[in-house]
Amino acid sequence: MIEVRGERIHLTPKEFDVLRLLVLQEGKALTHKRLLQTVWGPDHAEETENLRVVINQLRKKIETDPGNPRYVLTEPWLGYRFQLPSVVSEKHTRRKA
């Protein structure tokens, strides 16, 4: 279980493992292959649909608006990245300046 906005949220073991790995590498993009091999095992590097399902479920549980995620971000053609929104806001502000 984790706490999101003061509410306890149940995660499946795979959801927890994916989120844990992303949070431990906060700000760094992790490839689909690395996430799959670390969480599912070395024989599952190509099973990206499993990862997509878990990411979608995670977003439904931790994001305010899962369709516009602020924490679990997609890195197109690469994988996913966990980012705290305040850091995302700062990066966008710096680019505009």
Image: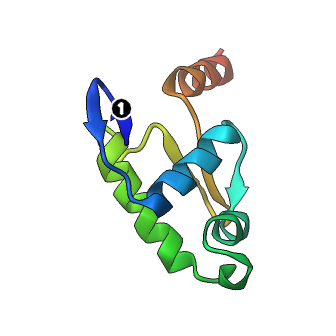
- Amino acid on which disc 1 is placed: Glu
- Residue 55: x percent and y percent? 45, 59
- Residue 41: x percent and y percent? 68, 75
- Residue 39: x percent and y percent? 62, 65
Kindly identify the residue that appears in the image at 35 percent across and 32 percent down: 3
Residue tagged 1: 3
Snapshot colouring: rainbow
11 in relation to 79, above or below? above
Element carrying mark 1: strand
Kindly identify the residue that appears in the image at 55 percent across and 55 percent down: 17
Residue nearer the viewer, 12 or 84: 12
* Residue that lies at the very extreme toward the left in this rendered image: 7
60 in relation to 50, above or below? above
Say which quadrant the C terminus sits in: top right
Say which quadrant the N terminus sits in: top left
Q: Quadrant of residue 64?
A: top left
Badge 1 crowding class, 10 Å Cα cut-off, few under 14, some 14 to 19, many 20 or more, is few
68 in relation to 44, above or below? above
25 in relation to 3, above or below? below
